[in-house]
Amino acid sequence: MAPFDLSSARAVVDKPAPTPVPWPRALYDRCVSTHLFDLTGRTALVTGSSQGIGLTLARGLAEAGATVVLNGRAAQRLVEPLESLRMAGHRAHAVPFDVTRPEEVELAVTRIEAEIGTLDILVNNAGIQIRSPLETMTIEDWRALIDTDLTAVFVVGRAVGTRMVARGRGKIINICSMQSELGRPTIGPYTAAKGGVKMLTRAMCAEWAPRGVQVNGLGPGYFATEMTQRLRDDPEFDAWLRRRTPAGRWGDPDELIGSAVFLASAASDYVNGHILYVDGGMLAVV
Ligand code: NAP
């Protein structure tokens, strides 16, 4: 054969491609769904899940098989979400508590673990937004925001993480934001808090990854919830957002479910201290 004779290679290329054999559905389910992403038998607490992203993530984790615990400050606001999850056939409970109150958090976590089940998954999601230029931002508003959006991640994370570490396993997902990376006028304390949540995620990873607990962050871009209602109602902001986001639109909270299930499941067992941004590409483009 001549050194550069490609006839035998051509023969291989020219051969008709074999008809692909589809994976048997049962095998696919066992390998991909049942094994890697399945949350059956797991118990998850999602803070701030009376509405918005928290409620959507709770539903997503329940759809993947988890027993979920809804949370918010007011018991009354949890009634309807709880009923809707149960009506859909999911295992769901509601435990109201204020994430900024350490004693309440400790009591609630003790109660959840005694009465519902030991926590395998924690989603630190509860958050608030207060918009004001820094010159007129009051110290009360600053403290309220830092307390809810940053300190509570430590408070709830400590209560649940301590128990997970003792068991040698667990998954913690801290809800970050694009403001973990980018500043923006009028949301100074939010930016400071979310930047802090990113670094707290890494601190938790440093201490707890060696003891079997994976701690990661999930960073939404701009999503259509009550928190962003005023921005969505502002035609100027809405137009800016659509231009600025490579995907050209607002995110739908359902689009966060896949990433949350990934970070909560065995599929992410070697993922530690990572912040997964789901932002339609906004952070990738100037
Ligand atoms: P949302 O619709 O305003 O919901 C916030 C949730 O937090 C509610 O369920 C609220 O429940 C709860 N909450 C507030 N303070 C609480 C406290 N002290 N204790 C317990 N629960 C408390 O907000 P969202 O848009 O879904 O945002 C959820 C998370 O995603 C927040 O951390 C937010 O910063 C983050 N995020 C949102 C976006 C977005 O575009 N929407 C983007 C990036 C990051 P109650 O009022 O019933 O207590």
Image: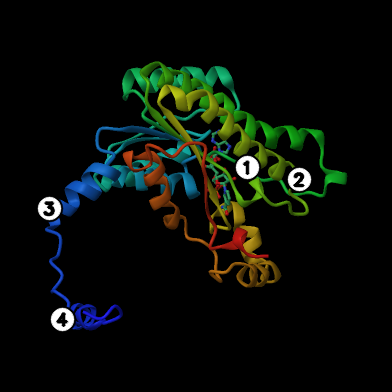
Q: Nearer the viewer, mark 2 or mark 1?
A: 2
Identity, as a three-letter code, of the amino acid under mark 1: Ile
Residue to which mark 2 is pinned: 188
Q: Give whichever of discs 3 and 4 has the lower sequence position.
A: 4
| Identity of the residue drawn at 34% across and 23% down | 118
**Residue behind mark 3:** 26
Instruction: Report x, y in % for residue 29.
Output: 18, 51
**Which picture quadrant has residue 34?**
top left
Q: Which residue is pictured at 61% across the width and 71% down the height?
A: 242
- Assess whether mark 1 and mark 3 are in contact (beta carbons under 8 angstroms): no
- Position in image of residue 147 (x %, y %): 66, 31
Residue at the spot of label 1: 128
Measure the alpha-carbon separation of dots 4 and 2. 61 Å
In the rendered image, the quadrant that contains the C terminus is bottom right
- Nearest to N terminus: mark 2 or mark 1: 1
**Residue at label 4?**
16
Q: Is residue 138 above or below residue 32?
A: above
Picture quadrant of ligand 1: top right
Q: Earlier in the sequence, mark 3 or mark 1?
A: 3
**SS under mark 2:** helix
Instruction: Answer with left or right where residue 164 lies relative to residue 195.
Output: left
